[in-house]
Image (tube, grey):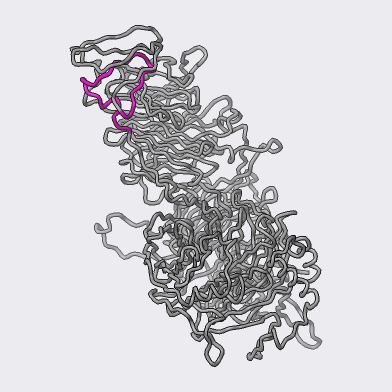
Amino acid sequence: MVSIKNVLLTTQITALEVKLDYVFLGEGQYLHIHHLNSGNRLATHKVFDAAVVHGINIRPVKNEESRHWVVGVWGQKSLALLLYKHLPGNEINSLIEERRFEDWIIDAVLEDNLSHIVLATAHNSLIRYKLQYSKDLEEQTYQGTFVESEGNCPAHEEKKDFVQWQNKSHLGFPAKTELLTWKNTRWKPDRCVLVKVDCTENCILYCGHIVLMAGNWESAVLLAGTVFSQVLIWGPWGCTDPRGRVAPMHCLSGHEGVLFSINFSAAQGLLTTTSDDRTLRMWSIIPKYPLSDTHSPPSIQVFNKEQVQRYWLDAEITEKHICYGHGARVWQSLILSSCVVSVGEDSKVCVWDQQGRLVSWWKAHDGSCVWNVAASEDEGQLVTGGGDGSVKTWSLNVTDSPKAEPLLNGPWCLTEKETPLIENEHSKVTDVSPQLLASGKDEGYKLEMLKNSEVFEDFDFEGAETIKRCTKNNSDQLPKANDFPRCVALVGVNQFLLAMDSGRLFQWHSEHATWTLVWDDPRMRKYVIMDTSSDQKKIAVGMLCGVVLIFRISNGNWEKHLEATLCQGKVFSLLWLGSDRILACGPDGDIVTWRLLEVQGSMVKERNHTLPPCKQRWVSAACIAPSTVPGGYGLICGDRAGSLHLYHQEDSVPRQSIRGIHGKNGVTSLVIHEGFIYSSGRDGCVRQLKLFDEGIQVLTVTRVSNVTWVAQVIFLQGRPLALCFHDVNLKLWNLAEDQAVVEVECGGGHRSWALHASRSEDKLVFFFVKDGIPCIFRTTLADKLMPMIKNPVNTRETMCLQTLFHVEGKTFFAMGGEDTTLRIHSVHGLESHRSLCVVRSHISNIRALCRIEWEGASNPAGLDRSVWLVSGGGRAQMKLWEVAPNYISQKNLPNAGSGHQEKVPVARSKEENTHQQEQHSQKDNTSVTCNSSREKMLSVGCREVTSHMIRTGSNKTWKSQELTFDPETRYMDANAFWITDKLAVIVLASSDGVLRVFVFSRCTEKLKLVCARACDHCLLKVVRVPIQTQHILASAGTDGRVVFWDMKSIVNWLYTPNVAVDNPPPSLELHQLAVVQSHQSGVNSLSINYHGKPTDVESYRSSLTLATGGDDNKLSVWDVIIDTSEDGLTKIAVDFLCCAIGHASQITGLEWISPNLLVSTSVDQRVIVWELCHTDTPGSATRTYLKATRSAYTGVPDVKVPYKTFSAQGFST
C-alpha cells in the first residue's frame, strides 16, 4: 500500500500572530507555534487539506494567564477552529474541522463569548457563523474553564448558557428563525450560517478588516478594500435598501492602486491602508460622539452597540499622511502605540511616526517579500514572516540611534601655557576641563596650572619617586599645540588607549570621563603601533627602533610588564597570535615569532620566517592553524600585496603562497572558526579556506554587497559578521543574511581604529580617530542580533534541488534558484531543518544541480565521503563543487578547553601606515561548545573547485568588434558521471539548443569543453540511460521530442592511456540514435526505469521504460529496447505503451520509485503516485495503462521536479 506523508514543508509564511511569548504562524496548510525568545517549535497542526492558511485570530478561553486559546484559522474558502493548551505538553486540539464556504474568506474575528465567528468574504459580504463544538471534545477541553468559571460575571454566565444550550440542541436549532435561506441551490447550505449580509457595492475585495468594538455581531464593522482603490466602511446594522443590502457609511478615496491591507486603532483614532501604489496612508478618525473608554487597554475596553454605531455613523474621516518609502507594493501595516510599521514586496520594513515621517527602515528577508508583520504585546519586538520561509525578530527600539561620541578637550588640546603638572600615573585629565585632578597619596597637594616660567612635573613608571623637572627651554618635554592622536587600542568595552604623536600613551576611563597618563617615551614619537592580546589583559606597543613594550592591566591600572627588542629596525607590524605568542615583522619581510613567559617576565624567540618580496613587504594579518605535521604548527600570513603564505614550524620561506588572492590592496584579517580559516581583504570578499596535507585550499568566496573594503571577520553566536568600510561609513555586515547590522559614520578605513564585540556583555564598541579627534561609538547587540524563529530556504523561486548524502540519520541537500545562491541544508524530521551554508558565487540564477555519479553502486575510489556537485544556470555559467561532511571536535579547536564561556571577537587597532592586524583563533560558546556525551558536531564543507563560462566578457569591449554568442544563454539541466576515478563527463542542456559535453580532471581540477551538438530548439532536460556497459544520453526540449545520443567516441577517448584532456581530437561527437515525438509542446520531465539490476552483466538487449511529462498536461510512457548485437552499432526501438492526463496544469517532474510506481508533480500543487498496470485479454495483446493510486496536495506553489532521496524510503519535492 502506497502512502504519502509530509515530512517537512518549508514555504512562504502567509499568516502571523503573537500572543504573550508565543508566535502563531501559518505555512501552507499548517499552523505552527514557536516560542518568541528561543525560537523553539512548541506544536504544529495540519489545519487544511488543500488550502493555504491566510489568517489567524486568537481569543483566550478564560484569561491570558491561563494560556489556553481558541484559535480561528482561515485560508482561501476554508475555516477551522483549534484549541491550544500550553500545559500539559503544548497541545493543539481541533474544535471544528475544516469548513468550506462558497466564497473566499478575507477576514475572520471571533466574538467575545466564543459562540460565533464573523466572516468577511471577497464579494463584500459579512457572515455570522455559529460555532458548534463536538460534545465529547467540549467536555474534555472546556470543563473547568469557562463553563465552571467562578463569579457572576455576565460574560461568564453567557458562555455557560451557551454551552448548556449547545448540549441540549447540538444539531436541531429552529431553521426558520436562525438558518439563512440560500437562493443558490448549487451550494449545499450550512446550518451554522445564521446571517449573511451584502453591501450595496457588490465588488471584489482584495482585503478587509473586521472591527468588533463591542465584541459581538451587532457592533461589527467591515473596512473593505476594493479593487477600485477605495475603502468602504459599513456594518450589518446599517441602512438597507429594498433588497436588504447595506449601504456604506463612508467611502475613502485616494489610493492609485489596489488595496492590500487595512488596519484600525480605536485608541488613536487612526486607520492605515497599504496599496499597489507603493504608499502607506494614514487616515484620521474624528468621531462626533467619542467613545469614553478608547484609551483603556483593549483587553478591558467595554462598549455597547449604540456607542459603536454612533461612533461610525457620525465620524469624520480624513486623509492624514501619505507615506512614501517603499520601492514596490506594500503588503501590510501594523499600528503600535508610538509608531506605524509597514512591510512590502521590496523586503523593506519601514517604521513611521505619527506625523508620517520615516523613522527607520531595513531590509528584512534578503530581498524576499515580507508578507506579514506582528509585534510582541510590550511592543519591544517585531516579528516578520517572509517569502523565503523564515520568521525573524527585530528590535523596535527605533528611538535609539547611537552616534559616535567625540572626546573633546583631551590632553593633546593643551597649549604650553595650559600644560598641567603631572604627579604620578594616577593623575587624570577630565574631558570637561583641562584642569588636572590629583588622586595621589598627598591629598592636600593641589595641582595648579603652570605659567610660562613654571616647571613641568612628570613621573617614573618603575614606581620610583623620581620627579623629572624641565624648564620652558626644554620644550621637547611639553605637549605641543600641534600634537595629535596617532594610534588607538581598545581593551574590553571600557578601556581605551590612545598613543600621541609626542610619544605619550593615555587611557580614557569612560566611567569617570577622565584621562590617565600611562606612559611617556620619546622613542614612541612620530610612529607607534599597538595590538591587544586575545585574553584582553595585555597590549603590545611597537616603535621605530624595533623595541616592543608589553603593558598589562593590574587592579584596573596599566603597568609596563617587559621591554624587548624584537626587530632590527622599524616594527612594521605587531600581531598577537594568542594570549602568550606575538609576531613582529621588521624590515625586508623579516618575521619573528616570540613566546611570552609571564612568570619570568621575559620573551623567548621561537621561529624566524621571511616574507616573499612585494611592494609593501610586511604582514597585515596572521593566524596559527593546527598543522598536519606532527608536533608542528601552521603559520598563515597575509601581506599588503593581497597574498597568503603558509609556513610550517621549521620553514624560513613559505611552503605555499597564494598570490593576489585578495587583490592588490592587501589581506585585512585571518580568523579560525570551527576548523575553517576565514580571510578578508580590500577586494570586498570573504574567503573560506581549509588547511590540508598539501596546503591551503580555497573553499568558497563570498562577496559583500556594494563593499570593496572588508576589514575583519568576527563570529557572534555562530553568525559570521564582516566589518566593512564603505565610503565614509563603517558597516557590520551579516554574511548569512546579506544585510547590515550596524552602520556608523567614521570617515572611512584610512585611520586608526579598534573594535570590540561581546554578546555576553551585549555591547559593541568602536574606537577610532576622525579629524584628529578620538571618537567612541557604543551600541547594544541584543537588539541587533535577534533570534531567528524559523530558518529560511530560498529568498526567491527555487529552481533545483539535489540530495548530497545521509549521515547520522540526517539528509543533506543543496538548493539553487533565482536568488543566485547555492544553499546547503540538513533535515531530520519535521522540526529539525537547519541551514548550513549559503554560497554567493553565481552571477545569475541557478537552474541545474547534479552530482557526479559513480559507475557502480558506490564510490570505487573509497577515499573519502566527498560529493562532487555541478551547478549551472544563467549567463551560461557552470561551477563545480566538492561537498563533504565535516566533524568538528571541540578538543581540536584553537583555544578549546580554556574555560572561557565565550571568546569575544576583537578587532585590533590599526595605524595609518601599517593598517591591518591579525585576528586570533576565536569561537562563540553557543556555536562550538559540545555536549560532554558527544565530542563531535556535524557540519558541512563546501569548496568551489572550478568554474566555466562560455563568454567571460571583456572590460575593454571597444578595442575589438566580434560576433558573439547569445549573451542570455542559460544552462537548463545537467548530468554528470565518472568514467574513471580521475575523469568525469559533464553534460549540459542549454537554452540555445546546444548539448555541451565537458571533461573534468580530478588531478588538475580543470574543465574542458570537448564536444557541442546543436539542436533545433531549447533543451530542457538531459539524463543518462542507466546501463553500465553503454553510455547513452536522452535529451528533451521545447519541441516535444526526446532524442537518444550515443557518446561512445568520447568515452573511448577517455579510456585511452595517458589521455591528454587539454587537447581533445576534433572527431569527438554525439551520434543520434533515435527520436521520439512524445508531446505537442515542451517536455519538462524525463525519467527512465531500467529493468535490470545495476550489478547484472548486460546482454545484447536491454529493456527500459521511459516516462515523460510536458506542458500539455499529459504523462506518456514508452517501452525502449536497446540492441547492441551488431558489432559497433547500437540500435534503439521505441514503442508507445500508454498515456494519462491526471493533472490540471503542466507536469513539472517525474520519478520512478519502483519498477511499476511513478510519481508526478505539477503546477497544480498535486503529487500523484501512478501504478503501471498490465492486463492480459484472451485473443488480444497485453493492455498497459496508468492508474492513480494515491494523490496528495502540497503547500508548495509551482512544484518542481521530485527527487528520490532513497530508493525505498521516499522522495522529496
Work out whether 1141 lies above or below 457.
below
In which image quadrant can residue 1174 be found?
bottom right
Placement of the N terminus among the 4 image quadrants:
bottom right
In which image quadrant can residue 220 be found?
bottom right
What stretch of residues is rendered in magenta? Answer: 407-432
Q: Is the magenta stretch mostly helix, strand or loop?
A: loop
627 within the magenta span: no
Which residue appears at 45% of the width and 78% of the height? Answer: 250
Work out whether 1094 lies above or below 610.
below
Q: Is residue 352 left or right of residue 1096?
A: left
Q: Is residue 639 left or right of residue 1138?
A: left
Which residue appears at 74% of the width and 60% of the height? Answer: 150
* Nearer the observer, 1136 or 899: 899
* Nearer the observer, 679 or 154: 154
- Furthest residue in direction bottom, as rendered: 242
* Residue 1038: % across, % down: 50, 75
Which residue appears at 51% of the width and 68% of the height? Answer: 291
Total numbered labels: 0
